[in-house]
Image (spheres, helix red, strand yellow):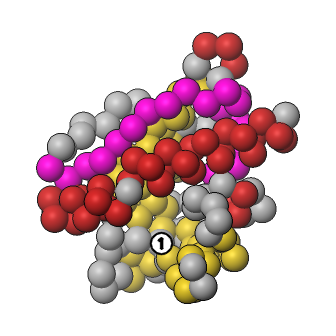
Amino acid sequence: MTTDLDPDTDLSFTRTLAAPRQLIWECWTQPRHIPHFFIPTPHKVTAVDIDLRVGGRFNTTFEVEGNVMDNRGVYLEVVPGEKLVFTDAYTEGWKPAPEPFMTAILLLSDAPDGGTTYTAIARHRNPETRKTHEAMGFFDGWGTVATQLEAYARGLM
């Protein structure tokens, strides 16, 4: 389940989460769970619309410091329990987005003691976009999301 990383365009980290892989998968694929972890608090997810299939929508609406932000995207790959790939480069119906930002790749595998090895990859169209995302706080932001996901999932156990 490896993905070739390009240091010029990709950002990535791997962490072990103390929750079972199937539960982490459920959290990422069922709309009711997404608001509990998907963006760093105190920001909020106010709407989620998921059609979990290749070409299906992964739409979210955020409230960040009083601003509403709509994020529209589609799934490019869905391997149950193992891999999710989604992008904002397209919207449902394969309509190109005017200003795509990235493609996200989530890899899940079993870790010792019933946990999950969780890898998050953000793949960008060019080095400039990658640098922008890193400067925006990719590692802190996505790390916070992983921490929130783990805490939320553990509360469901």
**Residue sitting at the far top:** 112
Residue holding disc 1: 73
For the point 83% across and 40% down, which residue is it?
A: 155
Residue 23, percent across and down? Answer: 73, 38
Total numbered labels:
1
- Give the left or right position of residue 79, taking residue 45 as reference: left
Quadrant containing the N terminus in the rendered view: top left
Q: Find out whether residue 34 is within the magenta segment.
A: no
Circle 1 packing at 10 Å, graded few (<14), some (14-19), many (20+), is many
User: Mark 1: which amino acid?
Assistant: Gly
For the point 61% across and 42% down, which residue is it?
A: 147
Residue 25, percent across and down? Answer: 65, 43
For the point 24% across and 59% down, which residue is it?
A: 130
Q: Is mark 1 on a helix, strand or loop?
A: loop
- Give the left or right position of residue 2, taking residue 4 as reference: right
Q: Identify whether 27 is placed above or below 54.
A: above
Q: Identify whether 96 is placed above or below 25.
A: below
Quadrant containing the C terminus in the rendered view: top right
The answer to whether one can see residue 147 in this image is: yes
The answer to whether one can see residue 79 in this image is: no
* Range drawn in magenta: 8-29
Residue 111, percent across and down? Answer: 58, 19
Q: Find out whether residue 20 is within the magenta segment.
A: yes
- Give the left or right position of residue 156, taking residue 81 as reference: right
Residue 76, percent across and down? Answer: 43, 59
Q: Which of 1 and 129 is in front in this view?
A: 129
The quarter of the picture where residue 48 lies is bottom right
